[in-house]
Amino acid sequence: MITVEHIQIAAFLGAGLCVGIGAVTTGIGSGIIAGEGAYGIVKQPKANDQLFRTMLIGQAAAQTAGIFALVISMLLIYGRSDAPEGGWYKAAAYLAAGLAMGLGSIGPSLGAGYAGGQACKSIARMPKHGNAIMGNMLIGQALSQTSAIFALVVAFLLMYSIPNQPEGITVGRILVKSVGLIGAGLSIGLGTLGPGTGIGFVAGKANDSMGRFPNQKSNIMRTMFLGAAVSESTAIYSLVISFLLIFAL
């Protein structure tokens, strides 16, 4: 017999894990950018304003996944977790939503942080190409945050598309569905780790290369896009499996 308290415990635990994990990695990513920006200002004092602006913009982009995690946590806390008819389905879905977005913020936050840090380092080396480097930084960070959007979509589906637990259903069926929902959250959450970090690494190296070989901007960007697309494929695999675990069981 499940009560309202059981569902609320699952929702609150999911909320805590979501924003807790998201805050850790977002803070690290933003710190990487700030560290490289501060070092770049000392190395190239004349580019102080440009580096400061790039640092702030890069940090704002790196905070995206953390903001997603905050939104999901707030919805889990203040959402409709007081309806006992939701049953174990809803309890598992709420916990899975928190895991999906919390774990799903790790890779994108670290990747965006690395890309932003390399951009600051590159601008300190070649200030006159700062606008091109910052533009490439934003594109790379946007690509690395794509998998965080996948995690956000899955979290919303887990919170709002799961029906109430049917009456008279067997314990085995309840376990299968509940474990499937938690598996969906883990699938997309862990599945974004590699793509988010990997794409950030690609973008970071592209930013670094632009500061060394500015005349090769087109080739660098083309290679970055191709590498990011291949890296993103595994996040799409995880997204597909999450959909199957949510809707096919």
Image (cartoon, grey):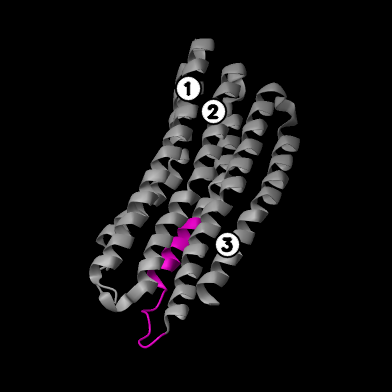
Vertical comparison of 40 with 156: above or below = above
The amino acid type of the residue labelled 3 equals Leu
Q: Are marks 2 and 3 in contact (CB under 8 Å)?
A: no
Q: Is residue 208 left or right of residue 158?
A: right
Q: Earlier in the sequence, mark 2 or mark 3?
A: 2
> Which residue corresponds to the image point at 36% horizontal and 73% vertical from the top-left?
88
Q: In which quarter of the image is residue 133?
A: top right
Secondary element at tag 1:
helix
CA gap, disc 2 to disc 3? 29 Å
> Which residue corresponds to the image point at 37% horizontal and 64% vertical from the top-left?
94
The amino acid type of the residue labelled 2 equals Gly
Question: Would you name the residue on which mark 1 appears?
Answer: 35
Image coordinates for residue 76, horizontal then vertical, percent? 31, 60
Question: Would you name the residue on which mark 3 appears?
Answer: 239
Q: Do the residues labelled 1 and 2 touch (CB within 8 Å)?
A: yes
CA gap, disc 3 to disc 1? 34 Å
Q: How crowded is mark 1: few (under 14 residues within 10 Å), some or many (20 or more)?
A: some
Bounds of the magenta span? Answer: 150-169
Secondary element at tag 2:
helix
Image coordinates for residue 166, horizontal then vertical, percent? 38, 84
CA gap, disc 1 to disc 2? 8 Å
